[in-house]
Amino acid sequence: MTGILHTFVDVMRDTLRDVMPIVLTVFGFQLLVLRRPMPNLRRVIIGFVYVTIGMALFLLGLEQALFPLGRLMALQLTDPSFLHVNFDAASELLGWQDYKWVYVFGAAIGFSTTIAEPALLAVAKKAHQVSGGAIGIRGLRVAVALGVAIAIALGCFRIITGTELQYYIIAGYVVVIIQTVFAPRLIIALAYDSGGVTTSTVTVPLVTALGLGLAATVPGRSPIIDGFGLIAFASLLPMMTVMGYAQLAEWRVRRERSRRASDVLQWYAQNMPNSPGAKTSSNEGTEDSS
């Protein structure tokens, strides 16, 4: 218990040092540039205290739980005894398909951490407000989370196979550029921002720990060369899924409008007396009577 308290004090001191430039910037501009007193000073001070304590507790939780958890899961999922192979012959016997549970875990942890990401929730709420409800909060979060899930699974595949990172990234951005040409303008900037907000406080620690642990346990992989890069995947794939989500929604709207227009035209042709359909029906009735 005493060790945790000492660690918390050290983390709190480091957090205060990191937050101080923000405080000096905000108060400096308010007092020296704008030359006005800080509005709601008491609330602002209390908010900074809450932020500082929360950041310190979060950083302590990262060191005590999230980082060890990511490394532990990578160790367990790649353990030769779990994969049912001999440790000495693991490098020769194991192929990328033998690590299927790593891909499943990577996708699951990517999805769940993104759904819990506070930065993404804040962006989704603001996008819902400024779009007048056109952009749904849940739909955007799920689209981003699916992108991160696919990204982490693909990143794990890259680490296990040892392929070059740049080929994935270049191909991914080519797809993003093509999607940008055809995606609705309403969603493009938001899709690009969604790639950034996913790599925030919750996602980065677990994903980084998973990548480093995976590279350290897979035979023939180096943590410093192969362990990093999952964050790049997590920033790239959500752009694709968000724009794809918008394109799919736009296509469904167009199809629904086309179906309704077709129904209206059909009703008009059958029920209006001067319509060609009505005349045809009248003529047919006359011919039958004759």
Image: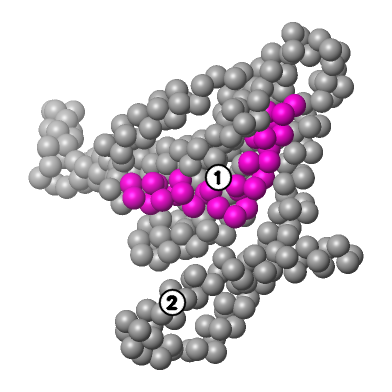
Judged from this view, the residue extending furthest toward the right is 1
- Give the left or right position of residue 256, taking residue 205 as reference: left
Disc 2, SS: helix
Q: Amino acid at mark 2?
A: Val
Residue 127 lies, in percent from the top left, at 41, 60
Q: Position of residue 114 (x, y in %)?
A: 58, 49
Task: Tell me: residue 227, above or below residue 92.
Answer: below
Q: Quadrant of residue 80?
A: top right
Q: Is residue 233 visible?
A: yes
Number of dots carrying numbers: 2
Seen from the viewer's position, the closer of residues 40 and 2 is: 2
Q: Looking at the picture, how far across and down is residue 132, in whole percent?
A: 36, 64
Q: CA distance from mark 2 to mark 1?
A: 33 Å
Where, quadrant-wise, is the N terminus in this rendering? bottom right
User: In the image, which residues are magenta?
Assistant: 188-217
Q: Residues within 10 Å of mark 2 (few under 14, many from 20)?
A: few
Q: Earlier in the sequence, mark 2 or mark 1?
A: 2
Mark seen at residue 26: 2
Q: Give me the residue at 51% from left, 35% from top.
A: 233
- Where is 180 relative to 86, above or below? below
